[in-house]
Image (tube, grey):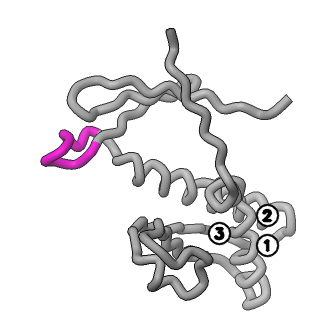
Amino acid sequence: MAETTDVVVSSVAGLSQEIVSGKHRWSADEPAPYGTDTGPSPYELLLASLGACTSMTLRLYAQRKGIDLQRITVRLQHSRIHAEDCVDCETKAGFLDRIDRQIELSGNLDAAQRQRLLEIAEHCPVHKTLKSEINIRTSLVP
């Protein structure tokens, strides 16, 4: 059986949304003038998911390997770029979504450990999901 994650998103007022996942509740919205800025935007939530997963993946790896990794800070930025401006992208027409991820590692780390942690960041499950083909099935509830 495939692992599933259930999240329920309900509209509140305007563009404001209530998000529920298990016992957790939070909000999403758009900044003014479109929304009322009662929570992060959908892209901010996406970036937060990638950042959290990256940090958790690095922490678990460091603990398993006995690496003195004290603090992880992940900064993320989303933008849209012209495909023709992307040197290492297969697509060369239209626009592409780009996520820039900067990772700051604190602790007693040598150059080899820092490089390995950078490589491990590429294996975070959310990173893998975003890089893979995603099959989204949408249906209306009767």
Mark nearest the camera among 2 and 3 is: 2
Dominant SS type (magenta): loop
Ranked by sequence position, the earlier of labels 2 and 1 is: 2
Categorize mark 1 by other alpha carbons within 10 Å: few (<14), some (14-19), many (20+): some
Where's residue 28, x and y in %? 35, 39
Ranked by sequence position, the earlier of labels 2 and 3 is: 2
Q: Amino acid at mark 1?
A: Ile
Q: Nearer the viewer, residue 98 or 94?
A: 94
Q: Is residue 84 above or below residue 81?
A: below
Q: Amino acid at mark 2?
A: Tyr
Q: Is residue 51 above or below residue 25?
A: below
Q: Residue at 62% x, 57% y: name it.
A: 130
Q: CA distance from mark 2 to mark 3?
A: 13 Å
Where's residue 48, x and y in %? 49, 54
Q: Which residue is mark 3?
A: 70
Mark nearest the camera among 2 and 1 is: 2
Q: Nearer the viewer, residue 6 or 96?
A: 96
Where's residue 123, x and y in %? 74, 64
Q: Is residue 54 left or right of residue 66?
A: left
Q: Which residue is mark 2?
A: 61
Q: Nearer the viewer, residue 112 or 70?
A: 112
Q: Are marks 2 and 1 in contact (CB under 8 Å)?
A: yes
What span is colored magenta in the figure? Answer: 30-38
Q: Secondary structure at mark 2?
A: helix
Q: Which residue is mark 1?
A: 67
